[in-house]
Image (cartoon, rainbow, N blue to C red):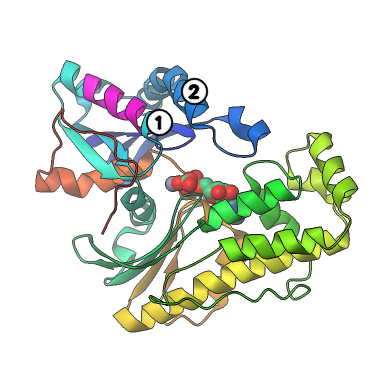
Amino acid sequence: MRILGIETSCDETAAAVVEDGAAILSSVVASQIAHAKYGGVVPELASREHLRAIVPVVRLALEQAGTTLDHLAAIAVTEGPGLVGSLLVGITYAKSLCFACNLPLIAVNHIEGHIHAVVLEAGAAIEYPALALVVSGGHTHLFEVREGFIYRLLGKTRDDAAGEAYDKVAKLLGFGYPGGPIIDQLASHGDPRAVKFTLARMKGNTLDFSFSGLKTAVLRWVEARDMTAEIEARRRSQRTSAPDFLPLTPQPTLDLLASFQYTVVEELLRRASVCIEEIGARSFIVSGGVASNAGLRTTARAARLGCPVFFPTPALSTDNAAMIAAAAFPKFRAGHFADFSLRAQANLALA
Ligand code: KG4
Ligand code: ZN
């Protein structure tokens, strides 16, 4: 039972073939480097890049899986949330393939895909109810996950997503895009207790997050010092990796990055811990781009959260299509198919 997954919700064009919701036969991800010089994703540019990449990426995924369209059971595609122009490329292509090859079409929520990146690998080891923390460039959500993949939203960010905070802080300090992996690596060279950030208390749902205050606190810290030359030197250097940036980054800045990361991880795990207790979670699933963060992984594993924690391998943490094909498997078995009226939904909710 092979499903071809297609994912184009943001700036990665991805296709994968997954067998029985568990075995990845291929997973191809073309990351768009065109956005790097703008310090963030440019929607029009993303759509154009998807158009360029979609055909070769799907072809390569089929080839690497040693299969052809005739041997597929279905085609799954991300319907949202994401950038409308980007989503449309994947959806239109998936519909065309289904129409031409007479295959069923399955619509997948991108956030559910991230959760299934973990289910795909850990399978039966995950016990329910589980708590899922989806942390990426677009989302910071906590869900209760019940048997049969029934979701209940417990908390989410009211402003920036955690990955977005990483990217904005990185841009502010002259590091490239995406900033998450760079800050993550540089943070290990700094003192996480050097800068104390006090965050506003949440009114209303205390399980919600807010990261824009932290971003502003970093901005104030920078403004209080004369860092223009240091930041400009990094910008001009055109370097892209953390080891390359290290000699251009003085100790106080490394301490700032370590303290920023410490605060983000604290915020995420404090709320997760409350949720685990509240719902009696028997597993804790962390997924999305920020799930590859070394600080988050180490701290979550060391913390006494009361249940086992599951992370996807780094390749499955960031956007990919294997997670979309995996999330489609239970839908296929339940006969939940989409028709050709399927549309891109920028703000699609999971629960
Ligand atoms: O899941 P993803 O590939 O795309 C979205 O759905 O948004 O996540 C990308 C985000 C970016 O904001 C990137 O900076 C962040 O994940 N990210 C990280 C790390 N690796 C990627 N953030 C912190 N630490 C990392 N190691
Ligand atoms: Zn994502």
Q: Which residue is mark 1?
A: 86
Tell me if mark 1 has few (under 14), some (14-19) or many (20+) residues whose alpha carbon lies within 10 angstroms of its own. Answer: many
Q: Quadrant of the C terminus?
A: bottom left
Nearer-the-camera pick, 199 or 102:
199
Give the percent coordinates (x, y) of residue 148.
Answer: 18, 61
Residue 179 visible within the image: yes
Q: From the viewer's perspective, tell me whether residue 338 is left or right of residue 310.
A: left
Tag on residue 350? Answer: none
Q: Residue at x 52, y 78 (%)?
A: 201
Q: Which residue is mark 2?
A: 49
Q: From the viewer's perspective, tell me whether residue 35 is left or right of residue 116.
A: right
Q: From the viewer's perspective, tell me whether residue 155 is left or right of residue 239.
A: left
Taking 326 as reference, is 103 above or below it? Answer: above
Residue 280 visible within the image: no
The disc, 1 or 2, on the residue closer to the chain's N-terminal end is 2
Nearer-the-camera pick, 211 or 111:
211
Give the percent coordinates (x, y) of residue 160.
Answer: 52, 56
Give the percent coordinates (x, y) of residue 115.
Answer: 36, 55
| Residue 91 belongs to the span the image colors magenta | yes
Q: Quadrant of the N terminus?
A: top left
The local secondary structure at tag 1 comes to helix
Numbered range of the magenta stretch? 87-97
Q: From the viewer's perspective, tell me whether residue 337 is left or right of residue 257.
A: left
Give the percent coordinates (x, y) of residue 122.
Answer: 37, 59
Q: Quadrant of residue 267?
A: bottom right
Tell me if mark 2 has few (under 14), some (14-19) or many (20+) residues whose alpha carbon lies within 10 angstroms of its own. Answer: many
Q: Of helix, strand and loop, which mostly describes the magenta segment?
A: helix
Q: Residue at x 46, y 75 (%)?
A: 271
Q: Residue at x 29, y 35 (%)?
A: 344
The amino acid type of the residue labelled 2 equals: Glu
The amino acid type of the residue labelled 1 equals: Ser
Task: Work out how far the residue at label 1 is from the one at label 2, CA to CA, in angstroms.
Answer: 9 Å
